[in-house]
Image (cartoon, rainbow, N blue to C red):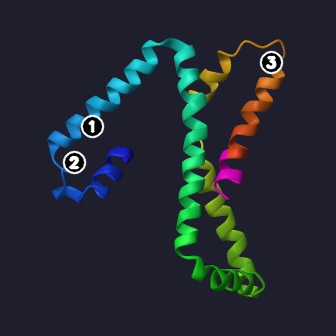
């Protein structure tokens, strides 16, 4: 739903080529077919797709962020000054702590699978002699998603 909403937004909104019910149907069938091809391939297919897709998504996200920063490079010094001024303002400290908690929880919930259950399925299919190492990998994923990529 969110990917379709974004596609409609960037293709002209409700009046664009994807804004009609036909566009929604086409998009739904296309996504279902792609997911079906991956799922019919079994766990190895899922692993092969995600091992390429997830790093690509992270790379695209970081590249897009850098493009936005470079396009607005003249605003970067003013943004840094605003951050520093707000960080050492007494009102900014109290609001910053509360805001950091709220934004942190939001970021953590939406940057990773947030309890949907897909990660445990992937981790349970791993063949390893040391299951605890797979647990450490599972613990590392939200850190990479939330702290490294989102920051």
Which residue was labeled with disc 3?
131
Which residue range is magenta in the image?
Answer: 145-151
Q: Return the x and y of residue 97 as percentages of the image width and height.
A: 72, 71
The Cα atoms of the two marked residues, 1 and 3, are separated by 39 Å
Which residue was labeled with disc 2?
18
Which residue lies at the image location 29% right of the left edge and 31% below the top edge?
Answer: 30
Above or below residue 79? Residue 70 is above
Is 114 covered by the magenta stretch?
no
Comes first in the chain, label 3 or label 2: 2
Which residue lies at the image location 57% right of the left edge and 55% below the top edge?
Answer: 63
Q: Which of the numbered marks, if any, corresponds to residue 27?
A: 1
Q: Nearer the viewer, residue 33 or 67?
A: 67
Pointer 1 and pointer 2: residues touching (CB < 8 Å)?
A: yes
Q: Is residue 52 visible?
A: yes
Q: Quadrant of the C terminus?
A: bottom right
Which residue lies at the image location 53% right of the left edge and 67% below the top edge?
Answer: 68
Side (left or right) of 139 relative to 59: right
For disc 3, the neighbor class at 10 Å (few under 14, some 14 to 19, many from 20) is few
């Amino acid at each position: 739903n969110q990917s379709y909403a974004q596609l409609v937004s960037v293709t002209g909104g409700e009046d664009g080529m994807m804004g009609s019910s036909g566009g929604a149907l086409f998009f739904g069938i296309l996504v279902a077919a792609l997911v079906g091809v991956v799922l019919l391939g079994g766990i190895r297919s899922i692993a092969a797709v995600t091992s390429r897709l997830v790093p690509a998504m992270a790379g695209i996200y970081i590249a897009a962020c850098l493009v936005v920063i470079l396009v607005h490079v003249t605003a970067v010094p003013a943004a840094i000054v605003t951050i520093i001024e707000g960080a050492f303002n007494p009102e900014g400290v109290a609001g910053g702590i509360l805001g950091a908690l709220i934004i942190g929880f939001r970021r953590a919930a939406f940057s990773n699978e947030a309890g949907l259950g897909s990660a445990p399925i992937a981790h349970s299919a791993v063949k390893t002699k040391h299951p605890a190492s797979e647990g450490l990998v599972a613990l590392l994923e939200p850190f990479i998603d939330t702290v490294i990529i989102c920051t």
